[in-house]
């Protein structure tokens, strides 16, 4: 939930990100997520958005916490996420 844990999660995800072929998209599925804090998501999703741009695809979620956090991040980054 914290900014520090989001940063650690992004660092731990780096090897997987390096294996992603340049033409492939990365889909993020929020199924099963109970809550998504803006600070954690900023440290994890914002760098992904910066690195992957249009190749980062977020799957739809009916979770209000996820929806609110993604809205905050889009406004903060001044860049929309791509949704499937």
Image: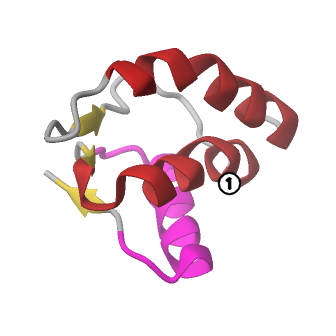
| Up/down of 76 relative to 17, above or below | below
**Who is closer to the viewer here, 51 or 9?**
51
**Which residue is depicted at the point 29% across and 26% down?**
20
Task: Look at the image and name its color scheme.
Answer: secondary structure
| Up/down of 12 relative to 55, above or below | above
Binning the other alpha carbons within 10 Å of mark 1 as few (below 14), some (14 to 19) or many (20 upward) gives many
- Percent coordinates x, y for residue 71 in the rendering: 48, 69
Q: Would you say residue 41 sits in the magenta stretch? A: no
- Percent coordinates x, y for residue 47 in the rendering: 57, 51
| Up/down of 55 relative to 80, above or below | above
**Which residue is depicted at the point 34% across and 60% down?**
53
Determine which quarter of the picture holds residue 24.
top left
- Percent coordinates x, y for residue 55 in the rendering: 24, 50
Count every numbered label the image shows and give the total.
1
| Up/down of 54 relative to 30, above or below | below
Q: Quadrant of the N terminus?
A: top right
In this image, 48 relative to 77: left or right?
left
**Who is closer to the viewer here, 17 or 42?**
17
Question: Main SS of the magenta segment?
Answer: helix
* Residue occupied by mark 1: 38
- Percent coordinates x, y for residue 5 in the rendering: 79, 28
In this image, 63 relative to 56: left or right?
right
Q: Would you say residue 63 sits in the magenta stretch? A: yes
In this image, 33 relative to 6: left or right?
left
> What's drawn in magenta, residue-wise?
61-80
**Which residue is depicted at the point 42% across and 27% down?**
17
Asked which secondary structure carries label 1, the reply is helix
């Amino acid at each position: 939930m914290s900014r520090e844990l989001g940063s650690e999660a992004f660092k731990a995800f780096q090897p997987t990100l390096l294996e992603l072929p340049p033409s492939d998209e990365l889909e993020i599925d929020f199924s099963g997520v109970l809550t998504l804090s803006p600070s954690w998501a900023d440290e994890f999703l914002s760098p992904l958005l910066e690195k992957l741009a249009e190749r980062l695809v977020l799957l739809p979620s009916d979770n209000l916490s996820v929806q609110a956090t993604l809205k905050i991040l889009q406004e903060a980054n001044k860049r929309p996420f791509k949704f499937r």
